[in-house]
Amino acid sequence: MTREEVLAYAQDRYGAEPEYLWEKFPTGFVLRHQSNRKWFAVSMDVRRDRLGLEGDGLVCVMDVKCGPLLSGSYLDKPGVIPAWHMNKSQWIGFLLDGTAEDETIKELLEISYDLTKGK
């Protein structure tokens, strides 16, 4: 999935609109719950070499809450990486460059949404 496809999916599935919070990082955004305002996803462009990836330039990364028990089972999947900017024991990341499988992205978004929805 691309950034645009994930945003369309999040709007359709969760009613979540991207919030662009950082003037310094105009493509970075968060997705929040409408009810409690908690983040369930954060996305940013990161240099490929900072992630240990081959090639030049930037790649769009999305971090989602996952928890330590589940993250280990996802880290061996294509395009799934340790969280870039969030707590690595509670969050996991995936690439929005077509590397991560669509179903994996949808599963991780659902897990994150459920973990952050509150009581």
Image (cartoon, rainbow, N blue to C red):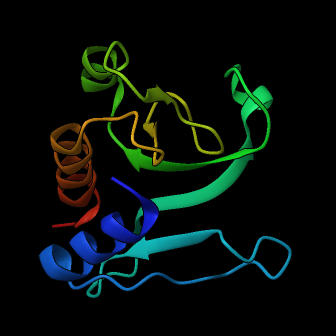
Where's residue 5, x and y in %? 32, 66
Where's residue 63, x and y in %? 48, 48
Where's residue 29, x and y in %? 57, 72
Q: Quadrant of residue 83?
A: top right
State how many labels appear: 0
Q: Using the image as rendered, state which of residue 101 and residue 16 is in the foreground.
A: 101
Residue at 30%, 82% (x, y): give it: 16
Q: Quadrant of residue 85?
A: top right
Residue at 66%, 72% (x, y): give it: 27
Q: Using the image as rendered, state which of residue 27 and residue 117 is in the foreground.
A: 27
Where's residue 24, x and y in %? 86, 74
Residue at 46%, 48% (x, y): give it: 96
94 sits left or right of 7 in the view: right
22 is higher (above) or lower (below) than 97? below
Split into 4 quadrants, where in the image is the C terminus? bottom left
35 is higher (above) or lower (below) than 38? below
Residue lying furthest right: 24
Residue at 35%, 35% (x, y): give it: 100
61 sits left or right of 113 in the view: right
